[in-house]
């Protein structure tokens, strides 16, 4: 009888050991699964960052073309040519804006060195630091400034 009891006790110990090992392996699998999910998220984030940087580089290279289209529309000799340039300009800008490009608002705003680059200051009756004129448009891409607006800024008139 003691032998049977001893054998049952031994089987119970083996069963408990196997259950402990199964729990240990299950926990290891859970940790591996969590690590794998974190790895996948990290790769997705990296790919998204890479894609955004590649798009940003392309957009930066297109900015001079956008400037040229805008200038051509303003200097076009006849209405038909002007409308053609404006149409092309609008199509390009719309595509880029859908991808995350935004124009920095400058004229009439308070000078902000994060968005604006002052090329000159001009005596004016406007409050000091007001952007009077935009010399070159500035842009953000997904909230990062990719080109500062080049602006003329108001300064106090000299008292005579």
Image (cartoon, grey):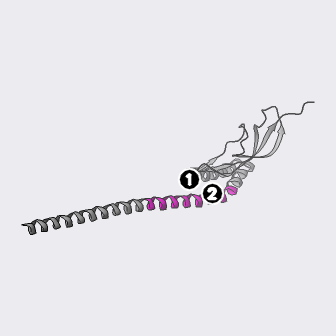
| Left or right: 78 as drawn, with respect to 92 | right
Residue 127 at x, y = what percent?
77, 32
In the image, residue 104 sits, relative to residue 60, either above or below, namely: above
Q: Of all residues shown, which one is farthest toward the left?
A: 1
Q: CA distance from mark 2 to mark 1?
A: 9 Å
* Residue nearest the viewer, comparing 6 with 49: 6
Q: Earlier in the sequence, mark 2 or mark 1?
A: 2
* Residue nearest the viewer, comparing 69 with 154: 154
* Residue nearest the viewer, comparing 52 with 113: 113
Under tag 2, what secondary structure?
helix
- Callout 2–callout 1 Cβ contact below 8 Å: yes
Which mark, by number, is residue 155? none
Question: Is 66 a magenta residue?
Answer: no
Q: Would you call the spot at circle 1 few (<14 residues within 10 Å), some (14-19), or many (20 or more)?
A: some
Residue at (35%, 60%) from the top-left corner? 30
Residue at (61%, 57%) from the top-left corner? 56
Residue 68 at x, y = what percent?
71, 55
Under tag 1, what secondary structure?
loop
Residue that carries the numbered disc 2 in the rendered image: 59
Question: Is 54 a magenta residue?
Answer: yes
Q: Of all residues shown, which one is farthest toward the front?
A: 2
Residue at (17%, 67%) from the top-left corner? 10
Number of on-image labels: 2
Residue 52 at x, y = what percent?
56, 57
Which mark, by number, is residue 99? 1
Q: Would you call the spot at circle 2 few (<14 residues within 10 Å), some (14-19), or many (20 or more)?
A: many
Write the start and end of the magenta stretch as one range: 38-65
Q: Mainly helix, strand or loop, the magenta region?
A: helix
Residue 54 at x, y = what percent?
59, 61
Q: Quadrant of the N terminus?
A: bottom left
Q: Of all residues shown, which one is farthest toward the right?
A: 160
Q: Quadrant of the C terminus?
A: top right
């Amino acid at each position: 009888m003691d032998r049977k009891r001893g054998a049952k006790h031994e089987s119970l110990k083996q069963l408990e050991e196997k259950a402990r090992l199964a729990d240990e392996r299950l926990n290891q699998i859970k940790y591996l699964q969590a690590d794998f999910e974190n790895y996948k998220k990290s790769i997705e984030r990296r790919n998204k960052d890479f894609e955004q940087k590649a798009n940003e580089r392309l957009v930066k290279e297109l900015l001079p073309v956008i400037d040229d289209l805008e200038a051509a529309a303003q200097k076009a000799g006849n209405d038909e040519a002007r409308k053609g340039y404006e149409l092309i300009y609008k199509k390009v800008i719309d595509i880029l804006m859908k991808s995350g490009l935004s124009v920095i608002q400058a004229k009439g705003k308070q000078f902000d060195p994060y968005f604006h680059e002052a090329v000159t200051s001009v005596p004016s009756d406007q409050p000091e630091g007001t952007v009077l004129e935009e010399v070159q448009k500035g842009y953000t891409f997904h909230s990062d400034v990719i080109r500062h607006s080049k602006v003329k800024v108001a300064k106090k008139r000299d008292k005579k």
